Image (cartoon, rainbow, N blue to C red):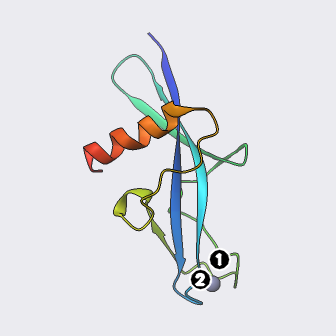
Amino acid sequence: MHEAWTNHEVWGFECLHCEGSWDEEFQVRHSGDGHGNEAVVYWRQGQPCTTPWMDRSCPGCGSQNVKALSARDGMHDEVPIARSGSDVAMVFHLRHLHAW
Ligand SMILES: [Zn+2]
């Protein structure tokens, strides 16, 4: 059985060069191959992209000396604006419960 699901993640980033910070929203598409393997693809603004913690550059100064802060580490505690209803908020709630 082929399974696929998508959830949203909001990642915070911090530039170690100019000390700027910003958030980016990603769609995370998970797909299982039915054999217990899971593939995860990150999408950003409708385009597949590298993982959030790779290859980011600062929108302010262009430095690639950027640190990714995941949405779950407490600095970005608010639930992002839900575009598709309460299930998005529920996903975030569950992720907080799992504490990862
Ligand atoms: Zn910067």
The reply to whether the residue tagged 1 has its Cβ within 8 angstroms of ligand 1 is: yes
| Tag 2: amino acid | Gly
Sequence-wise, which precedes: disc 2 or disc 1?
Answer: 2
| Residue in the image at 47% along x and 40% along y | 89
Does 10 sit above or below residue 66?
A: above
View extreme (top): residue: 1
Q: Position of residue 32 (x, y in %)?
A: 44, 24
Q: Position of residue 73 (x, y in %)?
A: 35, 63
Kindly identify which numbered label has been placed on residue 86: none
The reply to whether the residue tagged 2 has its Cβ within 8 angstroms of ligand 1 is: yes
| Residue in the image at 61% along x and 59% along y | 24
Q: Position of residue 98 (x, y in %)?
A: 26, 43
Question: Of discs 2 and 1, which sits in the foreground?
Answer: 2
| Tag 1: amino acid | Cys
* Tag 2–tag 1 contact (CB < 8 Å): yes
For disc 1, the marked residue is 58
